[in-house]
Image: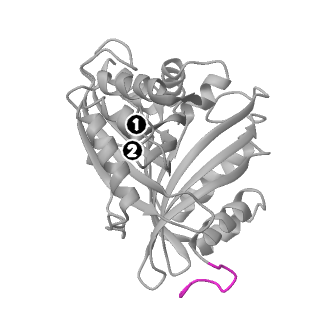
């Protein structure tokens, strides 16, 4: 790990280690060392620059969820320490809503939800990040639907004219990372599968998913098999039928003691012009920032003889950020 502290064996060790030290070890001062002063952080809710904002947001989150744990399920990564590296870190988080904050007055609700964070690491610091948290799962466990939660958020932030705007490419800020991932076959397979589904080739699901696939979707949804995948992807695409699907980053990995796996960061950009996962069409311009992780096994297709198939899939986007864009369009 050239350029990194000698305690880190590799990039997954670094990512998992600093995450645990910051959040559970309360080493917030370590953010001065592990996050670059001019870091760019993009989330569905907006974009920020600078280490000071990261530290302030971390403190606010811990004040609201003081027992929060970040359990690293996987780190799918590309690059080299000598050049630069991109990690796609999937996290299962547990927390109790014990303090007032961004999610309203303390409710005492015990929560469980996922996060995917793509981080560019170079010279012992993270200087570029794309962070997606399943806020839909959080608000549902607190007894709200994402649409009502987005409406309440707009009101708390001062109303439609004053509230911060969700992330769109127009407000993005350039960061130091310009890579697109690696050329591993498993990343290419996942990117191809997503592209086929988004191009309305829904029949691809029965060809590329294992019939016993376990599927984890926004809102804390856990489902399985071809019909579970079809319901999710059909409802999403039906809401934005004319939107442009774009793949931004692709990683595939073959690692010891792990199944072949892949991470793809992607987006939908366009108009809410269809009936689907987000209610009646409104004509709102919407940007969906999303990421998908997948693990592969030897079976796929209806006959189980395709030679490979998606056995586990984790797709995340922030439903509340999408609803916020729809509601702001309607005033």
x, y (%) of residue 209? 43, 38
The picture quadrant where one finds residue 96 is top right
Q: Nearer the viewer, residue 303 or 294?
A: 303
The residue tagged with tag 2: helix, strand or loop?
A: loop
Q: Which residues are magenta?
A: 1-9
Tell me, for residue 306, which label it has, or none: 2
Q: Nearer the viewer, residue 241 or 65?
A: 241
Q: Secondary structure at mark 1?
A: loop
Which residue is at the front of the view, 97 or 210? 210
**Circles 2 and 1 in contact, beta carbons < 8 Å:** yes
What residue did someone put label 1 on?
A: 301
Q: Is residue 191 above or below residue 255?
A: above
Query: Is the residue 21 above or below the residue 305 in the image?
Result: below
Q: Residue at x 61, y 23 (%)?
A: 140
Q: Main secondary structure of the magenta part?
A: loop
- Give the residue furthest to the top: 280
| Image quadrant occupied by the N terminus | bottom right
- Check the picture and name the quadrant holding the C terminus: top left
Q: Quadrant of residue 30?
A: bottom right
First in sequence: mark 2 or mark 1?
Answer: 1
Q: Is residue 80 magenta?
A: no
| Left or right: where 288 falls relative to 130 | left
Q: Position of residue 45 (x, y in %)?
A: 45, 40
Q: Residue at x 55, y 67 (%)?
A: 255
What residue appears at the point 40 percent right and 52 percent down from the top-left corner? 264
């Amino acid at each position: 790990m050239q350029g990194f502290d000698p305690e880190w064996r590799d990039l997954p060790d670094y990512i998992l280690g600093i995450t645990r030290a910051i959040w559970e070890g309360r080493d917030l001062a370590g953010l001065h060392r592990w996050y670059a002063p001019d870091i760019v952080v993009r989330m569905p809710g907006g974009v920020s620059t600078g280490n000071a904002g990261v530290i302030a947001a971390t403190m606010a989150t811990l004040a609201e969820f003081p027992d929060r744990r970040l359990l690293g399920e996987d780190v799918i990564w590309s690059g080299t320490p000598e050049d630069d590296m991109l990690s796609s870190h999937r996290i299962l988080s547990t927390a109790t809503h014990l303090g007032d904050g961004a999610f309203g007055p303390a409710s005492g609700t015990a929560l469980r939800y996922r996060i995917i964070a793509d981080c560019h690491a170079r010279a012992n610091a993270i200087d570029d990040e794309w962070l997606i948290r399943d806020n839909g799962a959080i608000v549902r466990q607190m007894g709200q639907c994402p649409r009502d939660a987005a409406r309440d958020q707009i009101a708390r932030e001062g109303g439609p004219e004053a509230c911060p705007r969700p992330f769109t490419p127009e407000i993005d800020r350039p960061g130091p990372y310009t890579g697109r991932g690696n050329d591993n076959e498993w990343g290419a397979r996942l990117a191809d599968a997503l592209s086929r589904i988004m191009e309305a080739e829904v029949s691809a699901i029965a060809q590329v998913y294992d019939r016993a696939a376990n599927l984890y979707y926004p809102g804390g949804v856990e489902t399985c098999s071809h019909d579970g995948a079809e319901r999710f992807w059909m409802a999403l695409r039906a809401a934005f039928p004319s939107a442009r699907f774009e793949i931004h980053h692709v990683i595939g990995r073959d690692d010891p003691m792990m199944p072949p796996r892949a991470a793809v960061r992607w987006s939908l950009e366009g108009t809410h012009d269809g009936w689907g996962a987000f209610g009646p069409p409104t004509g709102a311009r919407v940007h969906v920032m999303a990421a998908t992780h997948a693990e592969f096994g030897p079976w796929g297709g209806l006959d189980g003889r395709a030679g490979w198939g998606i056995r586990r899939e984790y797709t995340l986007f922030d439903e509340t950020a999408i609803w916020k864009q729809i509601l702001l369009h309607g005033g």
